[in-house]
Amino acid sequence: MLTKPSALIFTYRDSFAGKSGIEIGGPSQAFSRRGVFPVYPVLGSLDNCNFGASTVWEGHLQRGKTFVFDSGKPAGQQYLAETTALGELASGAYDFVLSSHMLEHTANPILALLEWKRLLADGGTLVLLLPDKHHTFDHRRPVTGLAHLIDDFNAGMGEEDLTHLPEILALHDLERDPDAGSMEAFKARSMRNLENRCLHHHVFDSRLARELVEHVGLNVDAVQEIGPHHILLVAKKGR
């Protein structure tokens, strides 16, 4: 279910029109012509990075000019790498970074955001969509604290982390997550998270989203809660 576009797309249109960017995860309905932040139709070019050659959401992926995100745009470069280790991509290479409902699947969000910040040119734009925990299967879980995310960063937390699994198994609302199946099936899938990346390691609300992005040194311009379950954040890299 998607809603009408956020008015922020009109405010920030010039940050994307004819410019080059990269999407981490995706392609995403949220950025499509009928999405909540329809940036695909106006941007100039878009590359992509996913964690592996096969994902639950996109199926099989292949490196090269294979990233198809909009029928009216040329395919972008597909990279396969951890979002926390994007060393093959040059610093300051992009005018914008997009990410929709991906950061919650990352064990070390601060490390990921620092990499995304590195990819941005001065004055570049980050568009981040996160799930609002109040309207998802995470609604029973407490919001993660910024201090916890800082601890994960300082500990060098890797994607093999299952620290949050006991909490997830106790509080995950399977009635709001029918694709997960039974509790037995959900637990079995969760134990293979390094392979499938389906877990939400961390739980967000608008306040944490802002605190996190400001913590990595980006300037938050706008945070907006959009139904049915989105937190939309737009930030800039200072010159």
Image (cartoon, rainbow, N blue to C red):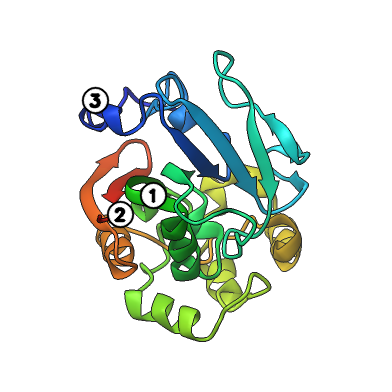
- Name the quadrant of the N terminus: top left
- Name the quadrant of the C terminus: bottom left
Q: Is residue 141 above or below residue 175?
A: below
Q: CA distance from mark 3 to mark 1?
A: 22 Å
What numbered label is drawn on residue 147? none
**Mark 1 surroundings: few (<14), some (14-19) or many (≥20) residues within 10 A:** some
Whether residue 232 sits left or right of residue 115 in the image: it is left
Name which residue type carries label 2: Lys
Q: CA distance from mark 1 to mark 2?
A: 7 Å
Q: Are marks 2 and 3 in contact (CB under 8 Å)?
A: no
Earlier in the chain: of badge 2 and badge 3, it is 3
Name which residue type carries label 1: Ala
Name which residue type carries label 3: Phe
The residue positioned 29% from the left and 27% from the top of the image is: 13
Q: Nearer the viewer, mark 2 or mark 3?
A: 2
Question: Does the image show residue 86?
Answer: yes
Dot 1: element: strand
Earlier in the chain: of badge 3 and badge 1, it is 3
The residue positioned 44% from the left and 65% from the top of the image is: 114
The residue wearing badge 1 is 121
The residue wearing badge 2 is 237
Q: Is residue 216 above or below residue 227?
A: below
* Residue 53 x, y percent position in the rendering: 78, 47
Near-viewer residue (2 or 15):
15
Q: Are marks 1 and 2 in contact (CB under 8 Å)?
A: yes
The residue wearing badge 3 is 10
**Mark 2 surroundings: few (<14), some (14-19) or many (≥20) residues within 10 A:** some
Q: CA distance from mark 2 to mark 3?
A: 20 Å
The residue positioned 36% from the left and 36% from the top of the image is: 228
